[in-house]
Amino acid sequence: MAAAVCAAECGLRVGLVDDNPSLGGQIWRGETTKCTSEAAGWLERSLRVQVEALCGTRVFHLPAPGTLLAESENEVYELSFQKLVLATGARERFLPFPGWTLPNVMGAGGLQALVKSGLPIAGKRVLVAGTGPLLVAVAAWLRQQGANVLAICEQARWISLARFGLALVQQPQKLSQALSLRGQLAGVRFLASCWPTEAQGSAKLEAVVLSRGERVACDYLACGFHLVPNTELAQLLGCQIRGGCVQVDEFQQTSCPEVFCAGEPTGIGGVELSLVEGKIAGLAAAGRRQDAVRHFKQRKKLQGFAKALDRAFALRQELRTVALPETIVCRCEDVPYDRLAAHQSWRVAKLQTRCGMGPCQGRICGPATEFLFHWEPDSVRPPVFPAQLEHLAWAACPSQSECGAGVGGES
Amino acid sequence: MAETIVVTVNRKPIVVPSGTTVAVAVVLAESQCRRSVTGELRGPLCGMGICFECRVTVDGRPHRRSCQIPCRAGMEVSVDD
């Protein structure tokens, strides 16, 4: 959104493609209507400069350079661009443990998104687990909505968390956020070096067993192991990826000169860093490099926070041994751990077991197998997202729809 | 009080505030979204359109990601039994 607004304010014709039903990405989901929020400010600016937004629309193919195909529920679009800013965000990393496929075991952000979408949570017993600052933020927010948050289980050790706390001292804004969250969570147990080893229940979740041996009866388990960048679209475009992140220069320009990238795909760093990167990308895409440079200092400061995140919430070895031989790893194709462990690479496992070949295209099990088996992800092929056959067929004889600059993604 | 609308999940009427997603209506109907290829019950996981666990049939169209679709009055949702 920041990139789109900044580019449009420079006079470019800007289209914004967002998979979500409304603008604002995952953090600001549903908040663009609240007039006091920062999200509303960006929305207002986007309306003033007439950013053309296609919500509920996802890009699935790049049929030719400078052209993207996208589909919504009922439409298909051919979008041509001179400059493209990718802001595809991140997703949660999920790690398999016995029972993690039961209904009501969700991501931490996943449960939050559902509650933001109308799920009543007041009075429900929620256990929050996994790793990363998202856990604390989600727990505090759920409690605010009336949830009975039983505990927060963070796999990282106290020593890592203490070091992270020290790093926050250099980020006053983040530190005050952290302190305020701590206040909101008074009375909620925070367990470090703790993770779920089993989710129990018949038709849906009933209880969670923790690594410390405790069994906790609950209605929901909100469990995510930090975040992984969404780089599929960048890969499809041929942008260079290293260490799971889209490589960009100081102007957020990728290895493809017409493609810029901002936010989590370039490295997990949070909403403030994403916004600064978005501003830089939008200005640079509009050719206003001298204006973009003014945001470099703030970005550098926030990148320090991103590095501290990576260090503090690195996954511990023990998490590799939580899945049992029969535990499902690939949820689309129901491939259990022991069928995968026999293989040497992601490619071979895909061919032999259909792991990662279902509708999510390995977005969930890919990061899990990368951690469990050290498998490298494979190349990405179109359609990069499951698309309707009629829309794929349409791609063969499209009509025209043009856009000066496109911004694809979530925020 | 937000305006409410009625959708059906496996023919059972569910009343939800407008703006609620189909995934939430399905969870409120105390129902899973689908059965996996080996018959396990599944519900929403990621809540943001990535995992495809919440896919259901909406107005006769299969494999819709229910977490990304807002409820519309009279919408007919069907899920695996």
Image: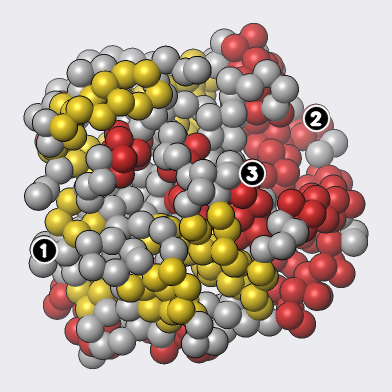
Say whether residue B57 is left or right of residue A243: left
Residue A291 circle label: 2
Q: Amino acid at mark 2?
A: Asp
Vertical arrangement, residue A164 with respect to residue B3, above or below: below
Q: Residue at x 81, y 39 (%)?
A: A295
Depth check, front residue: A226 or A292: A226
Kindly report the distance in space between the C-alpha atoms of the residues bearing marks 2 and 1.
56 Å
Q: Amino acid at mark 3?
A: Gln
Q: Residue at x 32, y 31 (%)?
A: B69
Image coords of residue B76 (percent x, y): 16, 27
Image coords of residue A37 (percent x, y): 70, 27
| Crowd class of label 2 (few under 14; some 14 to 19; many from 20; radius 10 Å) | few
Kindly report the distance in space between the C-alpha atoms of the residues bearing marks 2 and 3.
40 Å
Report whether mark 2 lies on the same chain as mark 1.
no
Vertical arrangement, residue A253 with respect to residue A380, above or below: above
Element marked by disc 1: loop
| Crowd class of label 1 (few under 14; some 14 to 19; many from 20; radius 10 Å) | few
Q: Amino acid at mark 1?
A: Gly
Kindly report the distance in space between the C-alpha atoms of the residues bearing marks 3 and 1.
37 Å
Q: Residue at x 22, y 50 (%)?
A: B32
Per the image, the residue denoted by label 1 is B39
Depth check, front residue: A293 or A3: A3
Res. A113 in view: no
